[in-house]
Image: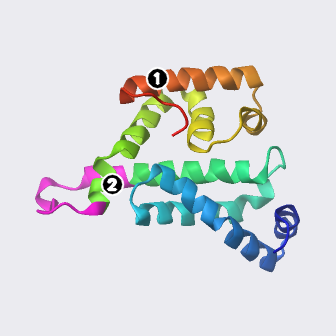
């Protein structure tokens, strides 16, 4: 197994084998990141596939600022949130006449559950305090260290900590629970 940094550089240079190997190596972590937000396995897999495509397409844009896996975490988290928005929109577009008699796990994953409540709270956070959402997701969903979040977002460390504190208070209020490292 080749070192991650070397694979990234070779993939960025256009080596198709290196790109395939890199995506194969990071896939399990990407799926886990997506699954932390999306409770239904197929939804998490869909988000992971979108994230891997985005990583492959935008690898040349990776600046080397922060760790590669931190950059991957940003993409995976954004992909999971976008998949959730798409599923939520599709559900909202269904007419009442199309509703199934028995609950469907895919439908249930979109309209119920603590992770779904969290996604709704994050959406509300993005509207109320947009500058705090990314830092919150990277810390409490992605488990990245404060220093790496500061580097990835090009924000002073103190500002990152303040944003996460603000976001946790907001999300805590939306969920009515204690919010620390989901």
Relative height, residue 31 to residue 62 (above, below): below
10 Å neighbourhood of mark 2: few (<14), some, or many (≥20)?
Answer: many
Task: Judge whether 145 appears above or below 13 on screen.
Answer: above
Q: Residue 151, located in which quarter of the rendered image? A: top right
- Vertical placement of residue 120 versus 177, above or below: below
In the rendering, which numbered label is found on residue 150?
none
User: Which span of residues is magenta-colored?
Assistant: 87-105
Task: Find the residue positioned furthest to the bottom.
Answer: 17
Residue at the (44%, 28%) spot, across then down: 178
Q: Callout 1: few (<14), some (14-19), or many (20+) C-alpha neighbours within 10 Å? A: many
Q: Residue at x 39, y 60 (%)?
A: 40
Q: What residue is rendered at 49% in x and 48% in y?
A: 81
Q: Residue at 31% x, 61% y: name it.
A: 106
Element carrying mark 2: helix
Give the quarter of the figure containing the N terminus: bottom right
**Does label 1 or label 2 sit earlier along the sequence?**
2
Does the magenta segment cover residue 89?
Answer: yes
Name the one closer to the observer, 58 or 119. 119
The image position of residue 8, as x and y in percent, is 82, 64
Measured from the top left, where is residue 153 in percent x and y? 72, 35
Q: Please state if 103 lies on the left or on the right of 105 as rendered.
A: left
Question: On the image, which quarter does residue 152 sit in?
Answer: top right
**Residue bearing mark 1:** 170
Magenta stretch containing residue 72, yes or no?
no
Q: Which mark is residue 109?
A: 2
Q: Is residue 167 left or right of residue 156?
A: left
Tell whether 77 sits left or right of 62: left
| Location of residue 139 in the rendering, given as x and y in whole percent from the top left corner | 62, 37
Circle 1/circle 2 CB separation < 8 Å: no
Could you tell whether 132 is left or right of 85 in the image?
right
């Amino acid at each position: 197994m080749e070192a991650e940094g070397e694979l990234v550089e070779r993939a960025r240079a256009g080596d198709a084998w290196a790109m395939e190997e890199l995506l194969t190596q990071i896939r399990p972590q990407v799926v886990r990141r997506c699954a932390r937000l999306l409770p239904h396995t197929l939804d998490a897999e869909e988000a992971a596939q979108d994230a891997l495509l985005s990583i492959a397409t935008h690898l040349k844009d990776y600046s080397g600022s922060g760790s590669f896996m931190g950059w991957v975490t940003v993409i995976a988290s954004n992909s999971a949130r976008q998949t959730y928005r798409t599923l939520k929109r599709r559900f909202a577009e269904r007419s009442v006449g199309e509703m199934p008699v028995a609950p469907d796990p895919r439908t249930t994953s979109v309209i119920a559950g603590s992770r779904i409540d969290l996604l709704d709270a994050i959406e509300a956070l993005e509207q109320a305090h947009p500058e705090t959402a990314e830092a919150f997701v990277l810390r409490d969903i992605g488990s990245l260290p404060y220093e790496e979040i500061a580097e990835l977002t090009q924000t002073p460390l103190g500002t990152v900590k303040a944003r996460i504190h603000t976001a946790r208070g907001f999300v805590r209020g939306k969920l009515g629970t204690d919010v620390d490292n989901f």
